[in-house]
Amino acid sequence: MSTFKAIVVEKAEARQTVRLTDFDDNDLMDGDVTVRVEWSTVNYKDGLAVTGKAPVVRRFPMIAGIDLAGTVESSSHADWKAGDKVILNGWGLGETHFGAYAQRARVKGDWLVRLPAGLSARQAMAIGTAGYTAMLAVMALERLGITPGRGPLIVTGAAGGVGSVAVAVLARLGYSVIASTGRPAEAAYLKGLGASEVIERKELAAAPRPLAKERWAGGIDVVGSTTLANVLSMTRYGGAVAACGLAGGMDLPGSVAPFILRGVSLLGVDSVMCPLALRQQAWSRLAAELDTGKIAAMTTEIGLADVIEAGRRIVEGQVRGRIVVKIG
Ligand code: NDP
């Protein structure tokens, strides 16, 4: 019998607890590929999972962690063999299937994406679900014809994980990026990632009007609620906004006016059940189009023992950019 270190979420008498503990190999869930986990990350959703602030974990006990990068140890899946370098995001990892904050994971081979050439496992987790979601949002805007020539794009929650990668990717693709943040002290950081303008989040916090002055061709929103309603009301005729987050709330207190009077589109982005072909495309574009210097500039490294505290900080909006977790 062998054991490994893992962050395990448990529930007793309706109360959720979390701890770093030893986990028995024999207790891993079914899967056709066993992965030695080398790197993980802390996303907002991981913060919700370890703090129990939202019902992310839906099976107890659960090894938390929605993102991993590592090396295949053994496989009975036709596509994978020992030694392959892989990434896994979503598909219920850390929610319904034992997750990434562990030295070993047993998963379905159908969920895995090959680590793209040019990215290390550490860089892949510096991008993580947050960065891959930012790329899915960029691709959604491109499909609607939102090219750099259409005008500036706004990114909300810009100093967070999705926001930081979105700013860097959009700027690299030639878009003029307006970064919205509640942390004006991060203006230099955001300009370093490529933002051409930084605005304060309070500009998007007032009660939304059905239509407001047109300010941008579209954007990427991670905040939801009043912020998203304001972003939509300020979007130019024919523009589009990709919505991928709820850091400010799950409601949407706006009107249909931007849709029916300005032809604005609201694009939903989901990373968890996203089809494999789109995932592979997003990851190969991130490898090719995201400046590795920018990834390094937005990344802080922690160990497995620091994850629970980092999870608390991310749900309080205190984390800048991305966190990578060295496992093992
Ligand atoms: P982070 O915590 O890193 O970033 C969120 C940012 O939002 C914060 O840094 C802050 O940015 C801003 N923010 C936080 N709270 C508020 C608030 N109350 N009002 C306004 N702005 C706020 O999280 P991630 O980047 O990892 O995730 C962002 C969101 O995207 C989350 O809601 C997450 O669940 C969601 N998400 C969804 C995915 C999907 O598949 N659809 C995948 C990945 C993430 P600043 O300080 O700059 O204002």
Image (cartoon, rainbow, N blue to C red):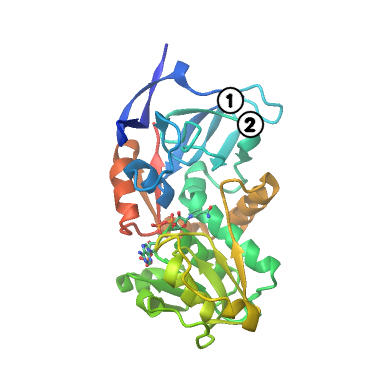
The verdict on label 2 being within 8 Å of ligand 1 is: no
Q: Give the image quarter of residue 319.
A: bottom left
Residue 225 seen anywhere in this rendered image of the structure:
yes
| Percent position of residue 268, x then y | 59, 61
Can you say which quadrant of the picture contains the C terminus?
A: top left
Sort mark 2 into few (<14), some (14-19) or many (20+) by Cα contacts within 10 Å: many
Q: Is residue 152 above or below residue 57?
A: below
| Label 1 SS | loop
| Disc 2 residue type (three-letter) | Gly
| Percent position of residue 57, x then y | 43, 38
Any mark on residue 109, and which? 2
> Ligand 1 is located in which of the four quadrants?
bottom left
Q: CA distance from mark 1 to mark 2?
A: 8 Å
Pointer 1 with pointer 2, Cβ within 8 A: yes
| Label 2 SS | helix
Looking at the picture, tell me which residue is in the foreground, 207 or 25: 207
Any mark on residue 8, and which? none
Residue 238 seen anywhere in this rendered image of the structure:
no
Q: Is residue 260 above or below residue 308?
A: below
Q: Give the image quarter of residue 259.
A: bottom right
| Percent position of residue 248, x then y | 39, 63
| Percent position of residue 288, x then y | 62, 56
Sort mark 1 into few (<14), some (14-19) or many (20+) by Cα contacts within 10 Å: some
Can you say which quadrant of the picture contains the N terminus?
A: top left
Q: Which residue is mark 1?
A: 31
User: Does residue 302 appear left or right of residue 240 in this picture?
Assistant: left
| Disc 1 residue type (three-letter) | Gly
**In the displayed image of the protein, which residue is found farthest to the bottom?**
213
Q: Residue at x 52, y 44 (%)?
A: 120
